[in-house]
Amino acid sequence: MIDKSFWKDKKVLITGHTGFKGSWLALWLIQLGAKVSGISLPPDTRPSLFDQLKISSQLEYNFLEDIRNQSSLDEHVATIKPDIAFHLAAQPLVRESYKDPLGTWKTNVIGSLNVLQSLYKLNNFCAVIMVTTDKVYKSKEWVYGYRENDQLGGFDPYSASKAACEIAVESFRSSFCLVKEKESSRLAIATARSGNVIGGGDWSKDRIVPDAIRSLNKGLAISIRNPNSTRPWQHVLEPLSGYMILAKKLFGSNYNLDKYDADYYASSFNFGPNLESNKKVSELVDKILFYWPGKWNFQNEITNMHETNKLFLNIDKSFNLLNWKPKWDFETTVSRTVNWYEKFYKNDITPYDLCLKDIEYYDKNKG
């Protein structure tokens, strides 16, 4: 599914490269021979996967910068001159968005537009993947999977800011990339919607897997706030593979406006697991405890924060247009994740080698 020959020597920009997903993506692309650069704030967790992987020396450029700083962003993008850009930089936590709603909106909407504005000033063609979230859809609490043309929305500040980002990206694309002017054809922009990713090296707070692992490592019971909430759980490598396949399609189109079809690659795509991987939080934790024995208990938390109970994604478009589909089932996803943390705490193998082993195993798995 991943074409190594395509990525060799491609100049790739990752915003948010110091985060969990960004670190995995940077490592994978480096292994494929890409010339990877990053723009991001410093890692905000201790430990952080980015620091554990020790890949900063393998980056072409490693700019520690806030994407809300337009002038600096312009300079860094002009220096990198990317062929392909993955925009992952964001304020990604629902609970944090309640604490700092304005900062969340500024980062997720204005920061994203800043990135597009900087890329728009390039003199070379660039394929752009703007990563949002599976929470951009207006919550219907239905059992159907959300499709890319379903209504956008968002109750909490995080979800709303990401839905607003989708609208802003669509406006930018329609205003500046779909008009028949030669100078406006240098960007091909798609949005990628995924979420609830798990995998080794996530050290974030208020995420179920890292919170569970921290508790288990200390011999404590895992506290669960919403055991009956259902989510489309997937390993981090699944959506990243989809982003990379979409990027290749976008880049290959080279934005031929005479043949351009907005329903194809320069549009929105869902990347989620197979239907059977849509599980309750309690089922996820029970499966974690199958591999790392322990206990969990219900934490009756009184809060005004809204949380969607049911969330599924329909991935037919990604399958039909990109020939992408998830490779790992729920069992494999959880077992590989728990195994990563167990080996890390036992000091059996470095985080770098643990991630490489997962990437190698994923590449060889035919799905």
Image (cartoon, grey):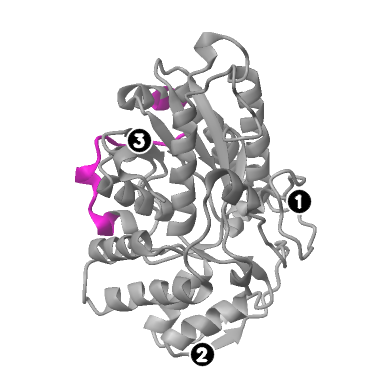
In this view, 113 is above or below 165: above
Q: Which of marks 2 and 3 is in front?
A: 3
Q: Height in image: 77 above or below 268? A: above
- Gap in Å between the C-alphas at discs 2 and 3? 43 Å
Q: Which residue is drawn at 72% across and 66% down?
A: 310
Q: Who comes first in sequence, dot 1 or dot 2?
A: 1
Amino acid under disc 3: Val
Relative to 252, is 285 on the left or the right?
right
Looking at the image, residue 216 sits to the left or right of residue 349; the answer is right
Residue at mark 3: 12
Query: Is residue 223 rendered magenta in the image?
Result: no
Q: Is residue 333 above or below residue 111?
A: below
* Three-letter code for the amino acid on which mark 2 is drawn: Lys
Q: What element carries label 3?
A: strand
Q: On the image, which quarter does residue 148 sit in?
A: top right
- Residue closest to the eye, 324 or 37: 324
Q: Mark 2 points at which residue?
A: 295
Question: Mark 1 = which residue?
Answer: 138
Tell me the CA gap for discs 1 and 2.
34 Å
